[in-house]
Image: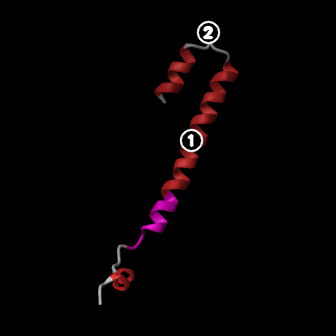
Amino acid sequence: SGIYVYGLTQTQRVPFLLELGVLLDVFVGVFIMGIVVFHINREFDSMSSVHLEELKES
């Protein structure tokens, strides 16, 4: 929200459409990070060692 407030104070110098473009970039970045975190959590959901039994030496 600090970036948004700073952007509002600089509207005379920077066009409003440019500010909206930066805000859209931030939202897209947060959305993509959310998807990545979701997939990481889904992949490492279980810390079970059952799958590691195959790696034991005979």
Other-residue count near label 2 (Cα within 10 Å), few / some / many at <14 / 14–19 / ≥20: few
Please provide percent x and percent y for residue 36. Answer: 52, 54
Q: Secondary structure at mark 1?
A: helix
Mark 1 vs mark 2, foreground winner is 1
Q: State whether residue 22 is above or below residue 50.
A: above
The residue depicted at 57 percent of the width and 36 percent of the height is 26
Please provide percent x and percent y for residue 33. Answer: 52, 48
Q: Quadrant of the C terminus?
A: bottom left
Q: Is residue 40 magenta?
A: yes
Q: Quadrant of residue 53?
A: bottom left
Q: Nearer the viewer, residue 44 or 55?
A: 55
Q: Secondary structure at mark 2?
A: loop
Please provide percent x and percent y for residue 51. Answer: 39, 81
Indicate left or right for 46 with 10 as reference.
Answer: left
Its colouring scheme is secondary structure
Name the amino acid, label 1.
Gly
Q: Which residue is mark 2?
A: 13
Q: Are marks 1 and 2 in contact (CB under 8 Å)?
A: no
Q: Which residue is mark 1?
A: 29
Name the amino acid, label 2.
Arg
